[in-house]
Amino acid sequence: MFAITDEELSNKQPLEETYKCYDCGEQHIIKYGDEILEDGTKVESKLLAFITCPITNKSYMVGLNGMKIR
């Protein structure tokens, strides 16, 4: 578990389209989770952002609400 305050997020930089991987050092495309609406449809949500390294197959959370967390 971790906690990030609104103040901490307001001081962060916005996410770009790619993010440098912690494992291999290469840039990977940022992906986002889906929000499931009441009618069952899925829409992309900018709440949680992550990358997945194709070499190690590990995923890392890199952003919240469109802002970098590291």
Image: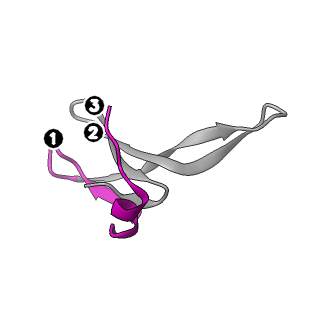
- Seen in the image, is 49 located left or right of residue 27? right
Q: What residue does disc 1 label?
A: 23
- CB atoms at circles 2 and 3 under 8 Å apart? yes
Task: Quote the CA–CA distance across marks 1 and 2.
Answer: 7 Å
Is 8 magenta? The answer is yes
- Judging depth in this view, the residue of 51 and 69 nearest the camera is 69
Quadrant of residue 10 in the image? Answer: bottom left
Task: Quote the CA–CA distance across marks 2 and 3.
Answer: 6 Å
Q: What residue does disc 2 label?
A: 53
The percent coordinates of residue 64 (x first, y second) are: 43, 52
Q: Residue at x 38, y 61 (%)?
A: 9
Magenta span covers which residues? 1-26
Q: Label 2 crowding class (10 Å Cα cut-off): few <14, some 14-19, many 20+?
A: some
- CB atoms at circles 1 and 2 under 8 Å apart? yes
Q: Which of the labelled discs sits on residue 5, or is there none?
A: none
Q: What residue does disc 3 label?
A: 58
The percent coordinates of residue 7 (x first, y second) are: 38, 64
Q: Amino acid at mark 2?
A: Cys
Q: Is residue 18 above or below residue 36?
A: below
Q: Earlier in the sequence, mark 2 or mark 3?
A: 2
Q: Label 3 crowding class (10 Å Cα cut-off): few <14, some 14-19, many 20+?
A: few
Task: Quote the CA–CA distance across marks 3 and 1.
Answer: 9 Å
Name the quarter where the C terminus is drawn: bottom left
Q: Residue at x 17, y 45 (%)?
A: 22
Question: Magenta stretch mostly in which secondary structure?
Answer: loop
Q: How is the image coloured?
A: one colour
Q: Amino acid at mark 3?
A: Lys
Residue 15 shows in the view? no
- Seen in the image, is 58 located left or right of residue 10? left
- CB atoms at circles 3 and 1 under 8 Å apart? yes
